[in-house]
Amino acid sequence: MPHLKVRGMDKKALIENSKEIIDGLTEIIKCDRNWFTIEHIDTEYIFDGKIVDGYTFVELFWFERTPEVKAMVGEFLTRMIKKINGNKDCCVIFFPLRGEDYCDNGEFF
């Protein structure tokens, strides 16, 4: 935790940059790097009967931080993803989690 789900970008590129992403987020969020997961979701975008290029989406599931930390994370992830995907559009979506809804190995936060 935090969990990142990334779609609309090359899997190999995400793998190659995953250490830098986690390093940067660890610095901003101030949590153990082992708490992070990155998931690549293979996606095809469809429009008007064709497969088309689409947005890169980063979904971040986390225990909410301050607005300042959230803004820094959004800026960092946008900058990193645009660097990786050739400056294509990128959307970061935050999904706040509550401890009473997060059960890890039988333990609630």
Image (cartoon, rainbow, N blue to C red):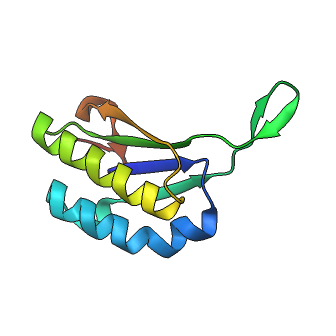
The picture places residue 95, in percent across and down from the top left corner, at 36, 32
Residue 102, image quadrant: top left
Q: Nearer the viewer, residue 99 or 9?
A: 9
Residue 55, image quadrant: top right
Q: Is any atom of residue 50 visible in this view?
A: yes
User: In the shown orientation, is residue 82 left or right of residue 95?
Assistant: right
The picture places residue 10, in percent across and down from the top left corner, at 63, 61
User: In the shown orientation, is residue 7 left or right of residue 101?
Assistant: right
Which quadrant is the C terminus positioned in?
Answer: top left
Judge whether 62 appears above or below 19 on screen. Answer: above
Question: Residue at 53% across / 70% down in the picture?
Answer: 15
Q: Residue furthest top?
A: 48
The picture places residue 25, in percent across and down from the top left corner, at 26, 59
User: In the shown orientation, is residue 2 left or right of residue 99?
Assistant: right
User: In the shown orientation, is residue 43 left or right of residue 86?
Assistant: right
Question: Residue at 35% across / 65% down in the picture?
Answer: 21
Question: Residue at 65% across / 40% down in the picture?
Answer: 54
Q: Residue furthest right?
A: 49
The picture places residue 100, in percent across and down from the top left corner, at 26, 30
Q: Nearer the viewer, residue 90 or 23?
A: 90
